[in-house]
Image: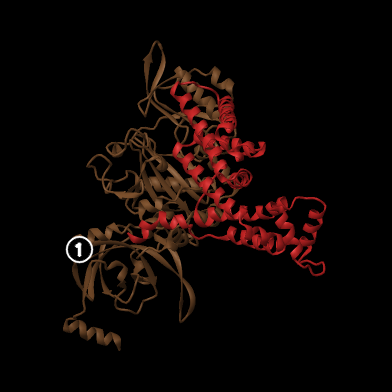
Amino acid sequence: MPMKFSHILGLNARTQLFSYRYNPPVARSTASSKLKTKRVLKRAGIPVPEVYKVFKSVKDIINFDYMSLPSSFALKPNKGLGGEGIVVVKKRVPSDGRAAWITTQKKKITADDLKLHTLDILEGAYSLGNVPDRAFIEEFVGRHKAFRKYAFRGTPDIRVIVFNKVPLMAMLRLPTRQSAGRANLHQGAIAVGIDIATGITTKAYWRGKYIHRKPGSKRKLHGIKVPDWTAVLETAVRCQEVTAIGYLGADIVLHPEKGPMVLELNYQPGLSIQLANAAGLRKRLERVEDLKVRDASHGVKIAKALFMASFADRVKAEEGIKTVKVFETIVVKRADGKKVKIPAKIDTGAWRTSVGEEVARELGLLREENILWKKSVRSAMGSETRPVINLTFWLAGRKIKTPAFVAKRATLKFPIIIGRKNLKGILVDPALSPEEKKEAISEAK
Amino acid sequence: MTFRFEEILAGQKLTSFGPSNFLKYAIRGAVSAGVPTNTVVLLLLLPEVAAIIAAFRHLVGLRGFGIFLPAALSLVFVETGPVVGIGMFLIIVSVSTFVRIVLRRFKIKLQYLPRMALLLLFVVLGVLLVLFAAPVLRRPDITNVSIFPILILVLLAEDFSRVQLGKSAKTAVNLTTETLILALASFIFLTSFEVQKFALLNPEVLLLAVLLFDFFLGKYVGLRLMEFWRFRRLITG
């Protein structure tokens, strides 16, 4: 579908329609304090990097022995914006008998440097409106091995936009030489779009244009598989459930051993994620606004069904065009994982694939956890709501996973009708065999 | 200028006192009591300047340093003339940047407020230097500069270096350029004779129009002009 400007979320709409409307003051205050965010998330059992020390006053700094810290850690302002004011050290080195550390930017800093920087933070040099702030020292989260070859020095993180418990869009932010190892886009990190359905990267956007490879190398940036993808998405949604930030941008890092961890939460997440994914947020926001979402895993299921990237279709096109007949026997995956053969009709007059209610129940697909959402339809019987379920089937040698509409179609011969939406890269041969013709005529009567 | 304003006021015939002309009566009363017409005109135009700056942000996408600074800067330009105003502004900005670089180069580590105070000291020295150079430059508009425009410029320098300290130099330069553009646009608006004349003769209509404009501007949720440019790759592919 071609993109329109009305699909894109701009700053005006973000602030007025979503950020202000869905983020109550308490949610905003949680998000704007990293320490408060940590407290709320930790209480709910969501993993966050450990805090070693909080500095509230100058006295705290004077009395603190920096030598007591582990050899790697991150010093952060509590209310810093856009990753400013963060110092990450990777190891301790001896320097004239005093303590010194090497930062991720490969600079040498001493305990005095750290003290001064902490003082700056307390004075509010990095906070919004320069109000006095707190500083804290946090566990250093290293790079996951999946990203080691792609990120320059720093730790990449994953930004997930969550709305109405559905993860709408995600991107991987890769630190570069230009961003000095930091994962913030305006400092020069690369924004890499991620397919919500699979966790595989699709496109990379850097400094105003799309790139295919990591700058200065031949490493492709698309096709990277993010480990623990479903866990990443569910963690992001869980953050929304416990903080009441209705329109949320969650920053998640993958700890090499401990898995997904939440770095910070944003109630006004940036809009460049749309460029990284070549998709409009506003359309996705409006798509899920009215859905009734039960919990994190339900939300993730909906997202995977709705927002699959179109590169999946490209893969199909590369396999070559397949031809199918009007009537085909397809293989359908039951709820228990077994496969069954079911006759289906290919209907290019329908958009969405639909399944008869009886058959859907027999296959076990009408169970609560497989229902994505309900759709209201108008028919001769008046208005009613019908479920839309997750359906997996094989046609022309391809596995197709799609949302399918459940229709009342007990009398029809074909319990499954396959719509145009799932026929990309497939040609339909309208010729019928003599028996099929006879059947079709009798069916019409 | 003021003389012309009074002529304009005298040239307008007023109907009997009512909601459509109560401000006109009030203005005449104040002017005859000795309030400078120039001040009245500038005050009447200030809400429009604020609306213009707001429109630049929400319809075009230019941010600047909030709404107060560009508006104040445009008033400075009215006072000093645009050339001297921008000149002073650039001197102040470059002095504060220079001091910052020097402090960093020589690794002089000071706390935040003392560092800001030091910065202001050098900014004031820079401004004084320009004033001392007045006999050499022989520009009458420099010698006529009063304390208030200078004070506003110095305050602006503080905002500038605050952004510079917290964020990158690039952001600071961008915001400063945008502020200058906004201030210049407001300056042109403020000094346009047609606009001044209209404000003086139709204050009620003007203020009501700005009120409605502000309201609808605040409800606008479409893309900004610069966002159409930013996201153009999404449409063209």
Which quarter of the figure has residue A321?
A: bottom left
Judge the density around disc 1: few (<14), some (14-19), many (≥20) Cα neighbours within 10 Å: few
The residue drawn where x is 41% and y is 45% is A159
Q: Secondary structure at mark 1?
A: loop
Q: How many marks?
A: 1
Regarding residue A27, the answer to whether it shows in the image is: yes
Where residue B166 appears, as percent x and y from the top left, is 50, 34
What's under tag 1, amino acid-wise? Answer: Gly
Name above or below for residue A350 compared with residue A370.
below
Task: Report the quarter where the C terminus of chain A lies.
Answer: bottom left
The residue drawn where x is 66% and y is 36% is B147
Name above or below for residue A71 compared with residue B95.
above
Where residue A246 appears, as percent x and y from the top left, is 52, 51
- Relative placement, left or right, of A389 versus A53 is left
For the residue pair A239 and B82, the one nearer the viewer reads as B82
Q: Residue furthest top?
A: A97
Chain coloured red in this rendering = B
Where residue A254 appears, as percent x and y from the top left, is 37, 39
Task: Report the quarter where the N terminus of chain A lies.
Answer: bottom left
Chain coloured brown in this rendering = A
For the residue pair A285 and A442, the one nearer the viewer reads as A285
* Residue under label 1: A397
- Relative placement, left or right, of B86 versus A95 is right
Q: What sort of colour scheme is used for the picture?
A: by chain
Regarding residue A365, the answer to whether it shows in the image is: no
Where residue A368 appears, as percent x and y from the top left, is 43, 60
For the residue pair B28 and B26, the one nearer the viewer reads as B28
The chain carrying label 1 is A
